[in-house]
Image (tube, helix red, strand yellow):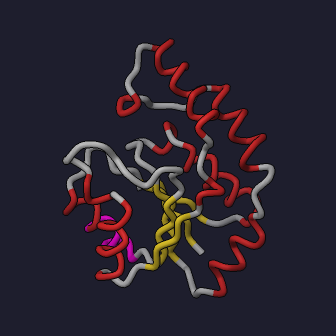
Amino acid sequence: MTIYTTGVYGLTETAFFDRLVENRIDTFCDIRQRRGIRGSEYTFVNSHYLQDKLAELDITYAHVVALAPTTDIREHQKAEDLKQGEHKRDRDKLGAVFASEFEDKIIKKFDFDTFVEQLENAGASRVILFCVESMAEACHRSIVANELNRRYEFEIKHL
């Protein structure tokens, strides 16, 4: 199994879905807590539209909310962004407190064995982890991908 990651900031609808098709993604794991983005620019990744489009492309959709940061954890990153004078869309790395809290409260408690078994049983081979930030290092999806690599030695590709 190969694990891909992607965000959406900076992409058009066409570029976003072309990226999935070009990389022959068969399983899309939405690891956001809330599956919507305000404003018209990124409506194509709001839950219903996204799921309908993925179905058209024959890509399996899963919302894996257990891999999403909690509101409390996200507040730590918001505080760090304010301290650094950065906007979420411009961030290039995660704050240390966010990463530590995500590791302790999400990664250590998540049942990765069952998750991988479910993916394998569904025939997944090219799985993408999705959240919104453009840079993987600025998003929790990089932590999840690194854990999958550490545990199972899956190849990781950040798109």
Identify which residue is drawn at 40% across, 50% down.
7
Identify which residue is drawn at 51% across, 52% down.
32
Closest to the observer: 123 or 105? Answer: 105
Question: On the rendered structure, is 69 left or right of 82?
Answer: right
Position of residue 128 relative to residue 97, above or below, is below
Identify which residue is drawn at 46% across, 79% down.
60
Position of residue 17 relative to residue 57, above or below, is above
- The rendered magenta stretch, by its main secondary structure, is classed as helix
Question: On the rendered structure, is 117 left or right of 122?
Answer: right
Q: How many marks?
A: 0
Q: Quadrant of the C terminus?
A: bottom left
Closest to the observer: 69 or 139? Answer: 69
Closest to the observer: 9 or 23? Answer: 9
Read off the magenta span: 18-24
Question: On the rendered structure, is 99 left or right of 48?
Answer: right
Identify which residue is drawn at 55% across, 50% down.
141
Position of residue 20 relative to residue 6, above or below, is below
Residue 144 appears at what percent x and percent y?
63, 53
Closest to the observer: 148 or 85? Answer: 85
- Specify the quadrant of the image occupied by residue 101: top right
Question: On the rendered structure, is 85 left or right of 75?
Answer: left
Residue 91 appears at what percent x and percent y?
42, 29
Q: Quadrant of the N terminus?
A: bottom right
Residue 14 appears at what percent x and percent y?
19, 63
Residue 59 appears at what percent x and percent y?
40, 79
